[in-house]
Amino acid sequence: IMATFTSLPGTLNIKVKRGDTFSTRVDFSIALTGYTVSSELLRISNRTSLQDITTEFVDAANGIVDVSMTAEETEALGAGTYIWQLTWQTGSQVRTAIEGFLEVVE
């Protein structure tokens, strides 16, 4: 029997109007007590970090996380497409849990 194990991030693409507040809730439906979570915005061309995205637990015991950007943060971005990713960490183990495109429109 041949088994396959995949540890790839889920995909969540986001589209937001420049200058608007953005917020979404992500429900992993697993216990993430003791973990830290973070998100960042990356340039597509070279995957360098542009800015952190506010990411916080609503309920770590059930894996519920809020991800948000203020109106000022989306206003500061030029119209275009970026990569965003959410990672979680416990001890030295880091996992990209979600990755996708963030499209900012005028």
Image (cartoon, helix red, strand yellow):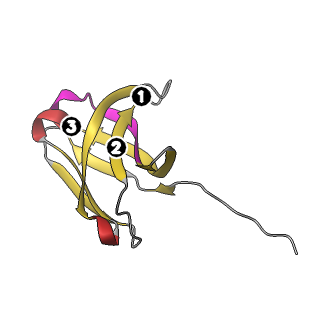
| 83 is within the stretch colored magenta | yes
Q: Quadrant of the N terminus?
A: bottom right
Name the kind of residue labelled 2 in the image. Ser
Q: Which residue is mark 2?
A: 39
Tell me if mark 1 has few (under 14), some (14-19) or many (20+) residues whose alpha carbon lies within 10 angstroms of its own. some
Determine the residue positioned at 39% across, 27% down.
Answer: 49
Q: Residue 48 location, x and y as percent? A: 44, 25
CA gap between label 2 and label 1 equals 14 Å
| 98 is within the stretch colored magenta | no
CA gap between label 2 and label 3 equals 23 Å
Q: Which residues are magenta?
A: 75-87
SS at circle 3: loop
Taking depth in this image into account, of 97 and 101 the one nearest to the observer is: 97
Tell me if mark 2 has few (under 14), some (14-19) or many (20+) residues whose alpha carbon lies within 10 angstroms of its own. many
Magenta: main secondary structure equals strand
SS at circle 2: strand
Q: Residue 68 location, x and y as percent? A: 21, 49
- Contact check, label 2 and label 1, Cβ < 8 Å: no
Q: Which residue is mark 1?
A: 43
Taking depth in this image into account, of 27 and 59 the one nearest to the observer is: 59
